[in-house]
Amino acid sequence: MGHDTSSLLGLKWHNGNSLSKIPNIKETIHYQINLNKKWCLSWTRLWWDMKFMAIWHPLIEIKKYVLLWKIFHHGIWTNLKASKLCGIPLWCKCCYPSIKDVPHIFFTCPNSNRVWHTVGKKIRLQKHLSWQQALLGEATGSSTTLWNAIRGEVLWKIWRERCALNFGDSPKEWLIEKPLFLLGKRIVNCKKSPPPPPPSGIIKFSF
């Protein structure tokens, strides 16, 4: 494309490959169709690529951006998916008779929704969060980087609590205040030690 590939370091495609590596076009088209079908959307390939690139960021810990990646792909093991293979009930343990799929686990289940409601108040959102903002990182009025970091904390918290419930661990508290506080400290530390500027003549990409 005429850009120095060193300017693309750290950015990745949906499959984790470096942005400087040109993806297989057929594979890329296939994943776009797949994702639009899973989420009942009609997003362009570029829009999906932007979503994937935004989650690979130093503010988001590895385990959290892997979870975000799996949510994008509906790669989380759910009752809906398991019922097709081994016939287990579709229902959510927390709020029978709701069907336990990815949007339900991370957004519409009452426990999960309460967490998002708390986040909305903390960051002073004027409107209620939509499932697209929570699960796919659609804009909320804050920067894309900050919102994806917040999403990573919230979705990881929900995932941990759901796992504790499913595996019979000791009861947990569905509180998000501490993870958001720790995220704030990471942001402050990043500002104190910003990354070095790119060499002159190289285009800097910001997401």
Image (tube, helix red, strand yellow):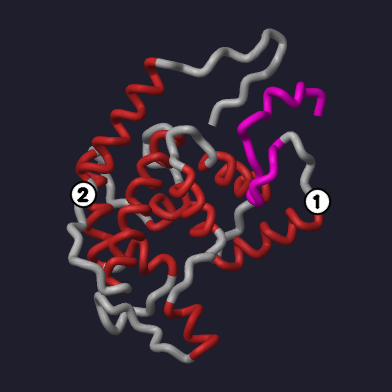
The quarter holding residue 147 reads top left
The quarter holding residue 2 reads top right
Question: Magenta segment, principal secondary structure?
Answer: loop
Q: Is residue 34 left or right of residue 71?
A: right
Residue 118 disc label: 2
- Say if 27 sits above or below 98 in the image: above
Residue under the image location 20 percent in, 43 percent down: 177
Say what amino acid the circle numbered 1 marks: Asn
Q: Secondary structure at mark 2?
A: helix
Where in the figure is residue 170, as x and y percent of width and height?
20, 66
Residue under the image location 47 percent in, 54 percent down: 67
* Residue marked by disc 1: 24
Q: Who comes first in sequence, dot 2 or dot 1?
A: 1
Q: How crowded is the residue under tag 2: few (<14 C-alpha within 10 Å), some, or many (20+)? A: some
Q: Quadrant of the C terminus?
A: top right
Q: CA distance from mark 2 to mark 1?
A: 41 Å
Q: Quadrant of the N terminus?
A: top right
**What range of the chain is rendered magenta?**
1-19
- Say if 167 sits above or below 56 in the image: below
Residue found farthest to the front? 169
Where in the figure is residue 175, as x and y percent of width and height?
20, 52
Residue under the image location 61 percent in, 61 percent down: 35
Q: Secondary structure at mark 1?
A: loop
Where in the figure is residue 136, as x and y percent of width and height?
47, 52
